[in-house]
Amino acid sequence: MKVLGIESSCDETGVAIFDTAQGRLLAQALHSQIPLHAEYGGVVPELASRDHIRRLPRLLAQALHEAGLSAQALDAVAYTAGPGLAGALLVGASFAHAYARALGKPAIAIHHLEGHLLSALLAEPAPAFPFVALLVSGGHTQLMRVDGVGQYRLLGESVDDAAGEAFDKTAKMLGLPYPGGPQLAQLAEGGQGGRFTLPRPMLKDASLDFSFSGLKTAVRETIAAPDWKDEYAPALAADFQQAVIDVLLAKADRALRQSGCSQLVVAGGVGANRALRAQLSAAQAKQGRQVFYPPAELCTDNGAMIAFAAGLRLQAGRADVQDAIAVHPRWPLEAVAA
Ligand code: KG4
Ligand code: ZN
């Protein structure tokens, strides 16, 4: 089956085609709205929705062209139904439903985080079920036990800011441009850690939950202190990044131990962070465990993960075929679990 995937939950417009028979992506087209939102310092929802409308038809044509397929060759149209920005989600959902209706093919709703966590199955080598997934994106920080397609159990999550949000807000405080996370990571790479003592929130806490807002406050106070100098920015970025990594490492380790799983999957935009990847892989290798990451270009939002998740669901006989347009801006992943 050839599955079209459409992602429009936030500030990336993604369209891709996955072929379940060949087990590979036939095409991917992506447009990032970062330059559009940059001058506002963050995502402007209405601008995001309007830009998705503008980009989708062209990205679709591009993906079909790259795959060498006619529209009629598609077997299903999948789209992100949530969580995300309501207007942005509605654009993708309406577009997907209209297109599916015109082709006489099913429209399949996909949960954005399911797309992220299953995208690690496109890595080589790929993990096998069961595994623990650490989802670290701009909107979520969660640990999930994954026993199969559609079999997800929440083990722990952030009680306040998401890890990506903490990166973005800290970057903003340091005067870095939106979206911040990747720029902060880059600044940290050139900084010498150890100058600042920052908290590791909930590190010792026995639960698998996270909290990042205290860390953000500590950064704000550090910058506001009378002895702050702008030249300390790389050092503070390095210490901030290390604080986040220490917490993610410790909680992921605890989740693996408690669940008895020996494989960890890291997904979501923060999973692109090089220092996080290096330290997680090294720490888990010492325990005889393996860590898997989606291919780098699939860490941040894209249409491929939506097409792929829908392909897996179709193969498992678990596709959520929708007759009407409905989106879920807030939507726990466990709601789509079997
Ligand atoms: O998964 P994603 O593309 O979108 C959401 O679903 O939220 O994740 C975006 C988040 C942003 O907060 C961004 O700053 C962060 O991932 N991010 C990073 C890096 N690349 C992206 N954070 C830290 N280091 C990176 N290299
Ligand atoms: Zn995402």
Image (cartoon, helix red, strand yellow):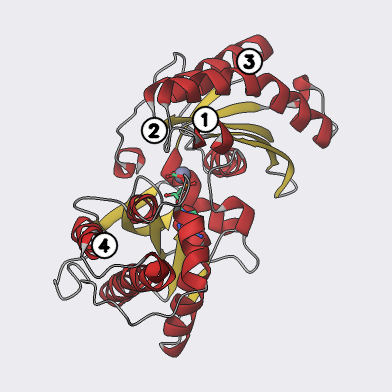
In percent of the image, x 44 and y 13: which residue is there?
A: 324
Residue type, mark 2 in image: Gly
Rounded to the nearest whole Å, what is the CA distance between mark 1 and mark 4? 32 Å
Residue type, mark 1 in image: Ser
- Residue 84, numbered circle: 2
Sequence-wise, the earlier of marks 3 and 4 is: 3
From the Cβ of disc 2, is ligand 1 less than 8 Å away? yes
Sequence-wise, the earlier of marks 2 and 1 is: 1
Residue 54 place in picture, x, y as percent: 62, 18
Residue 202 visible, this angle: yes
Which-is-in-front pick, marks 1 and 4? 4
Q: Nearer the viewer, residue 293 or 320?
A: 293
Which-is-in-front pick, marks 3 and 4? 4
In percent of the image, x 47 and y 46: which residue is there?
A: 179
The secondary structure type at the circle numbered 4 is helix
From the Cβ of disc 4, is ligand 1 less than 8 Å away? no
Which-is-in-front pick, marks 2 and 3? 2
Residue position for label 1? 8
| Residue 146 shown left or right of residue 212 in the figure | right
Q: Residues within 10 Å of mark 4 (few under 14, many from 20)?
A: many
Asked whether the beta carbons under mark 3 and mark 4 sit within 8 Å of each other, the answer is no
- Residue 99, numbered circle: 3
Residue position for label 4? 219
| Residue 288 location, quadrant | bottom left
Which-is-in-front pick, marks 4 and 2? 4
